[in-house]
Image (spheres, rainbow, N blue to C red):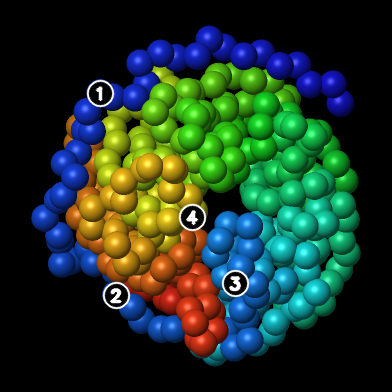
């Protein structure tokens, strides 16, 4: 399918000269996450990868039909399955080549896992946990998302020096179309009220140049807009607030939570947040944003760059931000976790945030379940 690319002029004046929220807000004890359970993943370790993190764990997915949590243990080369009713891991599926992105597909009762090393996507039955099929998604296959509006599956991957999101039929997994980007997209979000797809283009894990967000029509592949982020790089995680038409992203360089009005494509607020974030979530019930950060990364520090104050121990954190009536961000809670715990999943109907903690010394990996205050 030949795609028609229409790039609108870049909107200017997107980054505010000053942060629109204070760096430090009074902690709200009623908003602090509470650790409920810890699921130990015995034997889940793995080497120190290219990111400098030992036994790195990537993304998670939840299947409400089975009440199971699926964990992509990247460096361990496995898919870990936790039964939340039983409160234990029930299976470890080995032999995967750096599993990264993961999504549950209700249409077929499946979970799709994309592997970055060999570019293969594996499909497992969420009930039996048996592999149904596998197919080549593309080199560096990463983020996976299910689109309930069009019953499709999206997988990001590299294509030479650029990037692609391939769109598949959810039932047959036949390729429907490919959407190309100047660089490989990272986290992306779908607008359920329309056809827009928002994709982070961070420029790489060690990028220092300005990042951007691409906006495309997910049915045609047409480019709608590009949102440049002057002075911000490594924008990996993303979340979308449908009701208020707001996009939330985090840049790692520097560590900022950024709010974009998707009606105007203007940055309207930003605030300091936890370092090295790889996942964030919008909590619609509380009108809050939850950011998971792995902590300061010395291996990503630029030459002669000063060490930020307050981060000598490289400890990760869960930061929670409220949004006031003027659309400004306020950090209302910050809960320490462990170093490099930067991925997770917020399951709204359980009011639970699951945080992946890679191995630390002799201790194996674990998944921590935090209660996020709010009515179920």
The numbered mark, 3 or 4, whose residue comes first in the sequence reads 3
Mark 2 vs mark 3, foreground winner is 3
- Write the residue at 64% across / 42% down: 149
Q: Sequence-wise, which precedes: disc 2 or disc 3?
A: 2
Q: Where is mark 1, residue-wise?
A: 17
Direction front: furthest residue: 304
C-alpha span from label 3 to label 4: 16 Å
Q: Nearer the viewer, residue 228 or 310?
A: 310
The residue carrying mark 3 is 55
Mark sitting earlier along the chain (2/4)? 2
Mark 3 surroundings within 10 Å by alpha-carbon count, few (fewer than 14), some (14 through 19), many (20 or more):
many
Residue position for label 2:
34
Classify mark 2: helix, strand or loop. Answer: strand
Q: Which is more N-terminal, label 2 or label 1?
A: 1
Q: Is residue 177 toward the left or the right of residue 6 in the image?
A: right
Exactly how many numbered labels are in the figure? 4
> Comparing marks 1 and 2, which lies closer to the viewer?
1
Give me the C-alpha separation between circle 1 and circle 4: 29 Å
Check whether the beta carbons of the residues at disc 1 and disc 4 lie within 8 A of each other: no
Establish if 109 lies above or below 197: below
Which element carries disc 3, helix, strand or loop? loop
Task: Judge left or right: residue 123 versus residue 348.
Answer: right
Question: 299 or 64, which is in the foreground?
Answer: 299
Q: What residue lies at 72% left-to-right and 71% top-to-bottom?
A: 77
Q: CA distance from mark 3 to mark 1?
A: 39 Å
Residue 333 placement (x, y as % from top left): 22, 60
């Amino acid at each position: 399918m030949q795609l028609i690319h229409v790039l609108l002029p870049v909107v200017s004046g997107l980054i505010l000269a000053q942060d629109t929220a204070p760096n430090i807000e009074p902690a709200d004890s009623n908003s602090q996450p509470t650790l409920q359970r810890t699921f130990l993943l015995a034997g889940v370790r793995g080497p120190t990868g290219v990111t400098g993190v030992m036994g790195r764990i990537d993304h998670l997915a939840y299947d409400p039909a089975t009440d199971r949590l699926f964990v992509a243990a990247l460096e361990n080369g496995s898919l870990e399955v936790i039964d939340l009713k039983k409160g234990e891991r029930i299976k470890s599926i080995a032999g995967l080549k750096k599993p990264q992105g993961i999504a549950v597909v209700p249409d077929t009762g499946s979970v799709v896992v994309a592997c970055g090393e060999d570019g293969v996507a594996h499909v497992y039955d969420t009930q039996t946990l048996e592999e149904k099929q596998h197919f080549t998604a593309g080199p560096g296959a990463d983020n996976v998302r299910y689109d309930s509006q069009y019953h499709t599956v999206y997988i990001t991957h590299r294509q030479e020096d650029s990037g692609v999101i391939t769109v598949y039929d959810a039932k047959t997994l036949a390729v429907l179309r490919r959407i190309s980007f100047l660089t490989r997209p990272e986290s992306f979000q779908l607008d359920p009220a329309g056809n827009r797809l928002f994709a982070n283009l961070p420029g790489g894990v060690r990028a220092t140049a300005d990042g951007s967000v691409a906006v495309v029509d997910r049915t045609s592949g047409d480019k709608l807009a590009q949102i440049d982020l002057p002075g911000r790089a490594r924008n990996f995680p993303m979340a979308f607030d449908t009701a208020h038409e707001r996009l939330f992203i985090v840049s790692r360089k520097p560590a900022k939570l950024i709010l974009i009005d998707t009606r105007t494509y203007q940055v309207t607020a930003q605030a300091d947040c936890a370092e090295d974030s790889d996942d964030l979530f919008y909590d619609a019930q509380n009108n809050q944003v939850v950011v998971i950060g792995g902590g300061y990364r010395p291996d990503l520090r630029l030459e002669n760059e000063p060490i930020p104050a307050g981060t000598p121990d490289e400890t990760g954190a869960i930061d929670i931000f409220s949004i006031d009536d003027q659309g400004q961000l306020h950090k209302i809670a910050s809960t320490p976790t462990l170093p490099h715990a930067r991925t997770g999943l917020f399951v709204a109907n359980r009011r639970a945030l699951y945080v992946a903690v890679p191995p630390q010394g002799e201790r194996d990996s674990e998944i921590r379940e935090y209660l996020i205050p709010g009515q179920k």
